């Protein structure tokens, strides 16, 4: 199975900061990666699919990129509503696998 | 609007079985592959199964293969997850979902494995 190594596991940031979260795949997965946001007590929702395509309705401060097997979620100008846990998910082949998650907390 | 409603969770002893259901509405259920995802209390997301729109193919991670079986009844717009030989580490919220660009999740059903 493809392993997704996500980092950091947590971070503290202030409103307005740029936040970068990364996922590294254990093998090539093309652009078959999504980024999900989960707030406490809520179900996850997709922010980005196909590595860099912004889901409809998601603010443009969120962006995704890929370099080889490394994937990045960037939040430009962190907002109070962005404090949450973020996960990557590879959908290149089965079994699909999530990263371990990154909890973004208020500094 | 799309609705996914899970049911069937509960408290079960180790070694027991449960069948979870996911009732779908608001879309053509037979057109979509469906996933189950679980989340242990305070832990991350774990993908646990997929079934193609027509039930012809199913996939599982090694952690549940042989104990979990996903199925569907397109005439009833319902997805199922049969869980056998339950272990304490199977304690989690179980979500049914359509994943990807079309992203819909149910609210989950809680499975607690405890003696």
Image (cartoon, coloured by chain):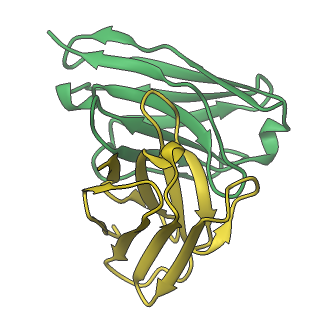
Chain colours: A yellow, B green
Q: Residue at x 50, y 83 (%)?
A: A66
* Residue B17 visible: no
Q: Position of residue A86 (x, y in %)?
A: 42, 53
Give the answer, above or below, for where B80 lies relative to A33: above
User: Is B49 or A49 nearer to us in this picture?
Assistant: A49
Q: Is residue B28 above or below residue A5?
A: above
Q: Position of residue B70 (x, y in %)?
A: 52, 36
| A37 vs A96, nearest the viewer | A37
Residue drawn at x 43%, y 15% as measured from the top left: B9
- Place of residue B100 in the rendered image (x, y in percent of width and height, measured from the top left): 64, 56
In the rendered view, does A21 fall on the left or right side of B85? right
Residue B113's quadrant in the figure?
Answer: top left
Q: Residue furthest left?
A: B115
- Where residue A81 appears, x then y in whole percent? 53, 43
Q: Residue at x 48, y 79 (%)?
A: A29
Above or below for B9 versus A64: above
Q: Is residue B105 left or right of residue A98?
A: right
Which residue is the extreme one toward the bottom?
A68
| Residue A84 visible here | yes
Q: Is residue A38 left or right of residue A103?
A: right
């Amino acid at each position: 199975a493809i392993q997704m190594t996500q980092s950091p596991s947590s971070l503290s940031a202030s409103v307005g900061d740029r936040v970068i979260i990364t996922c590294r795949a254990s093998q090539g997965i093309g652009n078959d990666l999504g980024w999900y946001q989960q707030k406490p007590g809520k179900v996850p929702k997709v922010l980005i699919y196909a590595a860099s395509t912004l889901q409809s309705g998601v603010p443009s401060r969120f962006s995704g990129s890929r370099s080889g097997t490394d994937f990045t979620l960037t939040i430009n100008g962190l907002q109070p509503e962005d404090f949450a846990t973020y996960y990557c998910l590879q959908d290149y082949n089965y079994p699909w696998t999530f990263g371990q998650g990154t909890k973004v907390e208020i500094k | 609007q799309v609705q996914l409603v899970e049911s069937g969770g509960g408290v079960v002893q180790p070694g027991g079985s449960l069948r979870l259901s996911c009732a779908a509405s608001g879309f053509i259920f037979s057109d979509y592959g469906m996933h189950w995802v679980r989340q242990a209390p305070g832990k991350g997301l774990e993908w646990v199964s997929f079934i193609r729109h027509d039930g012809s193919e199913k996939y599982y991670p090694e952690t549940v293969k042989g104990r979990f079986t996903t199925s569907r009844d397109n005439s009833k717009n319902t997805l199922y997850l049969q869980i056998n030989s339950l272990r304490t580490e199977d304690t989690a919220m179980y979500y049914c979902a359509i994943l990807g660009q079309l992203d819909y999740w149910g609210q989950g059903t809680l499975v607690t494995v405890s003696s």
